Amino acid sequence: MSKENKTAKTPTAAAGDETPMAPHKKMAAEFAFRAGEFFRFLPALLAALLLLRAAELLSGMEPGTAFGTAALVWLTAAALDLYALAKYLPLLFLLSLPLLGRKNGSVTGLGLAWSVFLLLQMVMVQYYFKSGVPLGADMYAYSLKDIFTTVKGAGALSVPMFFGLAAALAAFWAALTYLKRRALPGLTAKAAAIALAAALPLLFLAPAQPGTLRGLNEHSLTLALNKPAFFIDETFDYFSPAGRKAVKTGTSSGMALGSLSEEYPFLREERTYDALGPFFNRADRTPDFVFFIAEGLGRDFSGPGAGLGSFTPKLDQLAADGLYWENFLANQGRTFGVLPSLFGSMPFGRNGLAELGEKMPKHITLLSLAKKAGYRVRVYCGFNSDFDNDRAFYAINGADSLTDELNFGPGYKKSTSWGYADRELITRTLAGEPQDGKEPSVTVLKTSTMHTPYRFLGQEAYYPVFERHLDALGIQEGRKEAYRKHRDIYTSILYFDTELARFIGELKKRPAWRNTIFVLTGDHRLPEIPMSNKLSRYHVPLIILSPLLKAPARIKGVSSQLDVAPSVLAYLSRNYGLQTPRRVTWLGSGLDTHPSFRNVQTFPMMHTKTDLVDFISGYWFLNHKTLYRLGDSLQISQSSDPEPLRAMTAKFGAFTAANAVVTRDNALMPEETEREVGAYVQEERYKLPEALSDDLAQGLAVREVRAPESARAGALAIEISFANPGKNLSPKFVPLAVLMTAEAKELTESYGLPQQLNPDGSVTLKLNIKSEKVSPGRYFLAVFPSHPDTGKAVGSGKYRIPVLLTGNKK
């Protein structure tokens, strides 16, 4: 122990002086002593945290990650850890203060407390691996029952994390024992106290960790984040007065169609245009509906142009005969919001309106209106529907029957603690559904197999299917390990695909199918497979299948789940006379059925139950305070343009203010709104505009890219059309095409000649893609107008354009 610490052992008197020490000096001396003890033992904790952090990075790094990317992740993680240490060191000291006394057992108590901290660190890391996002304030929005259900189904620790935790605890106690016997040279007690006091302002003034860093994709950045620091930052924000303040709003809700009332900021006239009607033949009676909500189904691994390759080949084949929205978004990053969004086009409140259970504000949904129109509403799910208050939502909206884990019936086997897998769910649904279709019905299915722990009965039989599918996708041998790391997830997707095809095949055999409209979407994209950007979590398919369809169509106009209920009700109102409310609280404007990429919609997205930070309007995406330009395939590029940032911030601010009023008053609409109904009048309905009328227009953009499905390496050429629909001369730009792997690793860049377009001008040109040295396999192109000097995007591009290189040019 240092000399300073030895003298601090007798705070009652100075050496050789029997005069009692003044109370404030005694307190200061005791504080200084404990500060010295804190820094004395801190190296043991830091060594353990270092080992645990190394295990986290090794476990979370994807196989095949380039050395430069891996090095950047490690350096970023080290920098963020040092930042978190500097910011939260005073807090750690204050929590440890009672255990830094002079008693013999104090070091043991400190060791036990810090061991608990290490265990909590491991829990936060494990949560991140299972959910794809660091644990934040969303923990406070779940009931203890929901938390227990989630933890029970989370699965086991990975091998690196298990050994990392064991090594961290062993190193910690070894170092603590050594430091107890022999202190390392370090700070004096006085210097330690001064250091802690100097760091205290950082606790209150230092900003949170960054939400975006150039050079790191979404997965790499969240892996590098310090998980305890993220949790503490989110907790402070959640419980701060600013986080709970309800802001009074005017009659602007930030949404496209405005508002009628300050008291009810989302109340507006029903103006949704029937965009679906032209695609359907008219039936003799109102059609039946099946809504299939697939847990975790994302566009990254399903459908045409899927970035990771499509693992739903049977669904893709079925979808080719239906309506397919390629650029479709869920409005929630977790399951909690899918029912209010899909069926009610509702705002979120503080933690998702379904969180309120039976106390949800009075609202209108597709289910409640269908029930009043004579539909039978039946619901099937394989898990306990008390989770996320699904049961309460269905009950409030008039469901006639609900089959879930609690009343599934005999003869079915559970696969996990969550409940029944998709095979059992579909078999049970087929057994419960009437075959004749004599009365109109709405059937809702909600799956759970594509969720942790990604296990189902007979899974081993899908392992060779998975390997064959990798070959069918053209995945190179060197990239297969990245897929095999998530084998249980991919086999769960293939299993879902098989069971879904079986379900639709059986429905087609029944007489009721002739009058059925089948609607499928994902509640959100599963998070365990790394995501390429901040929209990946929301990017899900929307597919409509029906024998009533006139012809199939692939749709590239951007829509979200908030648009589904308004469009379905407008279709039923115009074509089958369904009476719908004259005033509604829809956030959605209706589905966009445009065949080319565009976005004329405005809508919010809620990342977790406590994290409302995402907003889209036109060709712009706002995440926290960072602005991105929105492109085809929902690819995004960061923008520093101040005017769109200002406009988007104002729009999002208006929405959050309106949402805060709903939270404060727990009211969406007046009591009489549901009773004031009327018929569809074409002249009163608004078609979606060709473009937004504000300053969020697209500007310079890639209008079309024509690329061959396959080409020999060195012989790949594409044709690009650029357009400048604005009223001003476009910026000077260079056509740029980037050839990349499915993991977004850039392989080559190919440039065209510099261009500049007049107002409303366009140009089409051919570009040869550098691919001579690229191995045969499946790749993607990103094409956009780039700055002549920096190479950064200066307009909207098209991304994730699939190409297959078949061999070297002869």
Image: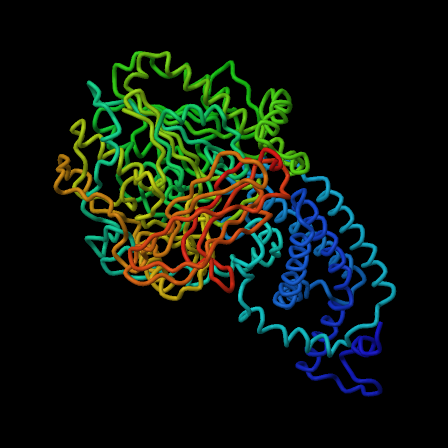
Residue 349: image location, x then y, percent? 36, 50
Furthest-right residue in view? 182
For residue 45, which quarter of the picture?
Answer: bottom right
Residue 203 versus residue 627: which sits nearer the camera? Answer: 627
For the view shown, which residue lies furthest in the front direction? 810
Colour scheme in use: rainbow
Quick check: can you spot residue 672?
no
Q: Is residue 91 above or below residue 300?
A: below
Instruction: Determine the image quadrant of residue 687.
Output: top left
Q: Residue at x 83, y 72 (%)?
A: 185
Q: Nearer the viewer, residue 102 or 444?
A: 444
Give the x, y percent position of residue 50.
Answer: 73, 56
Q: Position of residue 638 (x, y in %)?
A: 47, 58
* Left/right of residue 762 with respect to residue 47 in the rendered view: left
Viewer-side residue, 705 vs 519: 705
Give the quadrant of residue 2. Answer: bottom right
Which quarter of the image is occupied by the N terminus?
Answer: bottom right
So how many labels did they put on this image? 0
The answer to whether any part of residue 311 appears in the image is yes
The residue lying toward the viewer, choosing from 206 and 519, is 519
Compared across the picture, whether 51 is left or right of 406 comes to right
Q: Position of residue 364 (x, y in %)?
A: 26, 39
> Which corner quadrant holds the C terminus?
top right
Residue at the (72%, 48%) spot, across then down: 55
